Amino acid sequence: MTNRKQANNKGRNRQEKVVNKDLKPHVQKDLLEVQPSRKDEFEKRKQELQDETQQYMYQQSSKFSSVSRSLVLGIIGTIWVLTYVDGNLLIPNGWMLSSLVAGLIFLLTDVIHYFWDSMSYHCEAYKLDNYKNQHDLDKEHEPRMDRINKRSHWFIVAKFFILMAASILFAIGLSLKTSLVYL
């Protein structure tokens, strides 16, 4: 190779090295921009945990409702079997009557709870089409969903206390009825 060609090749190599040096910071900068920040990772993990918690809450809520509904229907059925005599419903004491009323209040509360939640979730599902950006979701949809979830939680707490009252009243009434039978 001639000296001139060698000089041109050295010049090109220098230019390539300069170009490669210039590319490295850009490539590194782009990689840094693509990598999520710690705050983004935290928010993503937080959202995953919220979704998991909400799914678990719905699962446990449905189990609670199913089991408690069965218990209340069992209480009402037992009262009916024990007090239905010769075509007449003769409730032997106020405890059993109170337990029966509490059981019916529980069932009514259960129906109101699920109807109200179903209607609320249905409305929110349709409103999702009207939201145009993330701000709308954050400022309108999320607070509404939070209110629905909080209301649902209070219904569950109320149903638990009604169930406990019906069970205690039933146990007292049943113990008094059986004590009357043995006398």
Image (cartoon, rainbow, N blue to C red):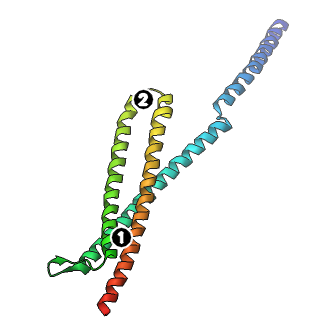
Which is more toward the observer, 112 or 140? Answer: 112
Query: What amino acid is found at the position of numbered circle 2 in the picture?
Result: Tyr
Q: Which residue is mark 2?
A: 131
Q: Position of residue 109 (x, y in %)?
A: 34, 57
Closer to the chain start, of discs 2 and 1, is 1
Residue mark closest to the camera, 2 vs 1: 1
Q: Which residue is mark 1?
A: 71
- The residue furthest top is 4
Residue 8 spot, x, y in % from top left: 79, 9
Q: Is residue 69 above or below residue 30?
A: below
Q: Is residue 156 left or right of residue 21?
A: left
How many marks overall?
2
Above or below 116: residue 38 = above
x and y, in percent, of residue 107 in the image: 32, 61
Asked whether residue 178 is in view, the answer is: yes
Which element carries disc 2, helix, strand or loop?
Answer: loop
Amino acid at circle 1: Leu
The image quarter containing residue 160 is bottom left
Q: Of helix, strand and loop, which one carries label 1?
A: helix
Report whether residue 63 is seen.
no
Q: Residues within 10 Å of mark 2 (few under 14, many from 20)?
A: some
* Quadrant where the C terminus is found in the figure: bottom left
Q: Residue furthest bottom?
A: 183
Q: Is residue 81 above or below residue 9?
A: below
